[in-house]
């Protein structure tokens, strides 16, 4: 019953947690979708408003240029022409103002298409109204100036009429005085010629006096009217750019409000920084994809063929010795390893071996710990794992069984180096050795910094073991010993060692695509020499774990160990 309740509670709890997780996912998705829709609508609205503002600016510039040319052409026009154009402007203003629509410059903004069309129409309408208002204002001032000029011309004409009337009246008075002075009596005597002339002059004078009075009154009346309507002619017409820009103030306010709303959207806040670094990131990704290909192609098609044409390395020539050949297996056989090997430890010999490889030994043997394989090469001993070794010595022949008890895929091989022989060997494959107890272990290292073969394979240091010594070697799935002959090629990762009389060089892998995909190494080891032999394991495992988390670190450490010949 208790188990049933526990199972039911676990079932309910698991599904309750799933239910809560689904709720959180749906809420997060809804919030994200809402933010994205708000950002998309806001950004589209701001873009539409900016396009409308830019279009209105260009439209206003065109209207301003046309209005300037049209109004300045009326500077010398008549009062009637100016009045006719002013009436047209007033009619256009009435039509535009009657076409006004409800403002859409509010938040939240409508859909993008509606907003774009309305914004363009409204912005263009506001600009046209502002240009026409400025044109009407100027035409009114110009009309007043033209009216003032006409009044002044009329005043001058009336003043000239008054002057002429007054001159005619004065001339009449002068003629009458002359006649009275010449005929003082006859001019007063009725029926005389002088009296008739004087009467005619008096009648003409009365008429001239009336004409002069009428001319004077018309002149004074026009002078009063001219003083009341006096207005200077305005300067040439120009558009007030500040007022024209002010006509688009609602559009700019809507743009500012939209940008403020976008600034509060977290998608907009992240979009700009991401877009700024996106090209650089794309270039980095592209270089990360293409640079390894370019480097591999350069190594494969340039450096590797150059290295293949260089002379091979000869360790024996450097050591100036004639190495004795190692004993080979029977004809047709090269496998020298087995799951376990039996050795006979003679008196006067010592065995150094990893404790996990020592399967059985006589109880009469003397055992103790030797911390390093060779104190002259502490780094090599540590890097190769040849530390904390078991040292065996016996006063009588002792049979010792060696086996790889920690890994079922490993096999053990025994390699006897007779006196005078030398073997270039990588200590990573060494698990133990047997040598004379009273003789130091003969190990030497040799650097090859001037060889392109060494640099391409990153094996700059070669470690040489000299006989007499017996090496206990391990190898995955087996160890083989073969004669170099006229040239043999094997994978570098499989090579364990070769005799010093072997000519060592590198050979480019046969196909490029497997090398590019990391399925093959760039170079294989090549061994030449009639009497030389080389040693390799059948299935190398070091550096063969692509895709694992620590593979890059493993590859780095393998490269370092390879440089030191380990």
Image: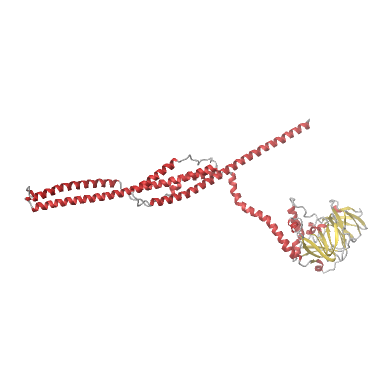
- Residue 343 place in picture, x, y as percent: 90, 57
User: 261 or 170, which is in the foreground?
Assistant: 170
Report the residue that reaches farthest toward the top. Answer: 1
- Vertical position of residue 8 compared to residue 432: above or below: above
Q: From the viewer's perspective, tell me whether residue 266 is left or right of residue 250.
A: right
- Residue 422 place in picture, x, y as percent: 84, 64
Q: From the viewer's perspective, tell me whether residue 198 is left or right of residue 26.
A: left
Q: How is the image coloured?
A: secondary structure
Q: Quadrant of the C terminus?
A: bottom right
* Residue occupying the point 13% across, 48% down: 202
Rendered image quadrant of residue 19: top right
Report the residue that reaches farthest toward the right. Answer: 396
Q: Is residue 7 visible?
A: yes
- Residue 425 place in picture, x, y as percent: 82, 61
User: 347 or 470, which is in the foreground?
Assistant: 470
User: 274 or 188, which is in the foreground?
Assistant: 188
Q: From the viewer's perspective, tell me whether residue 190 is left or right of residue 349.
A: left
User: 447 or 398, which is in the foreground?
Assistant: 447
- Residue 562 place in picture, x, y as percent: 77, 59
Counting labels gives 0
Q: Quadrant of the N terminus?
A: top right
- Vertical position of residue 114 compared to residue 500: above or below: above
Rendered image quadrant of residue 400: bottom right
Q: Is residue 500 visible?
A: no
Rendered image quadrant of residue 515: bottom right
């Amino acid at each position: 019953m208790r188990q049933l309740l526990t199972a039911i509670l676990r079932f309910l709890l698991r599904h309750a947690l799933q239910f809560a997780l689904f709720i959180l996912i749906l809420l997060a998705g809804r919030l994200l979708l809402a933010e994205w829709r708000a950002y998309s609508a806001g950004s589209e609205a701001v873009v539409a408003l900016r396009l409308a503002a830019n279009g209105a600016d260009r439209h206003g510039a065109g209207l301003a240029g046309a209005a300037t040319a049209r109004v300045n052409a009326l500077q010398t026009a008549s009062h009637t022409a100016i009045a006719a154009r002013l009436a047209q402007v007033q009619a256009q203003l009435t039509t535009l103002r009657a076409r006004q629509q409800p403002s859409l410059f509010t938040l939240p903004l409508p859909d993008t298409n509606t907003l774009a069309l309305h914004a363009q129409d409204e912005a263009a309408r506001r600009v046209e109204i502002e240009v026409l208002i400025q044109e009407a204002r100027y035409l009114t001032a110009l009309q007043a100036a033209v009216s003032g000029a006409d009044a002044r011309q009329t005043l001058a004409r009336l003043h000239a009429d008054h002057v002429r009337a007054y001159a005619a009246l004065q001339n009449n008075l002068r003629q009458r005085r002359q006649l009275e002075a010449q005929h003082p009596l006859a001019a007063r005597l009725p029926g005389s010629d002088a009296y008739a002339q004087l009467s005619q002059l008096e009648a003409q004078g009365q008429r001239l006096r009336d004409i002069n009075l009428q001319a004077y009154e018309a002149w004074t009346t026009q002078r009063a009217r001219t003083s009341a309507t006096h207005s200077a002619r305005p300067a040439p017409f120009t558009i007030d750019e500040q007022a024209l820009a002010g006509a688009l103030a609602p559009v700019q306010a809507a743009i500012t409000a939209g940008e403020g709303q976008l600034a509060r959207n977290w998608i907009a806040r992240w979009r700009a920084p991401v877009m700024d670094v996106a090209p650089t990131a794309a270039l980095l990704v592209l270089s990360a994809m293409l640079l390894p290909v370019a480097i591999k192609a350069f190594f494969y098609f340039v450096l590797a063929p150059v290295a293949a044409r260089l002379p091979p390395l000869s360790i024996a020539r450097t050591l100036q010795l004639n190495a004795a050949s190692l004993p080979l297996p029977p004809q047709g056989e090269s496998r020298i390893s087995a799951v376990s090997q039996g050795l006979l430890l003679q008196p006067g010999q010592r065995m150094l071996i990893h404790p996990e490889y020592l399967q059985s030994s006589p109880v009469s043997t003397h055992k103790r710990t030797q911390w390093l394989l060779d104190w002259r090469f502490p780094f090599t001993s540590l890097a190769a794992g040849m530390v904390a070794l078991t040292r065996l010595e016996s006063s009588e022949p002792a049979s010792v069984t060696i086996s790889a008890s920690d890994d079922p895929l490993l096999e053990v091989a025994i390699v006897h180096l007779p006196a005078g022989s030398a073997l270039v060997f990588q200590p990573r494959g060494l698990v133990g050795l047997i040598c004379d107890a009273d003789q130091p272990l003969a190990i030497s290292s040799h650097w090859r910094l001037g060889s392109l073969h060494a640099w391409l394979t990153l094996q700059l240091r070669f470690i040489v073991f000299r006989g007499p010594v017996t090496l206990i070697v391990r190898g995955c799935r087996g160890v083989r010993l073969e004669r170099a002959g006229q040239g043999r090629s094997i994978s570098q990762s499989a090579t364990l060692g070769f005799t010093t009389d072997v000519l060592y060089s590198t050979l480019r892998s046969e196909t490029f695509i497997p090398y590019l995909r990391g399925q093959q190494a760039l170079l294989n080891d090549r061994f030449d020499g009639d009497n030389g032999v080389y040693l390799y394991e059948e299935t190398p495992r070091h550096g063969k774990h692509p895709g694992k988390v620590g593979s890059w670190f493993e590859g780095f450490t393998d490269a370092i160990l390879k440089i030191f010949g380990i």
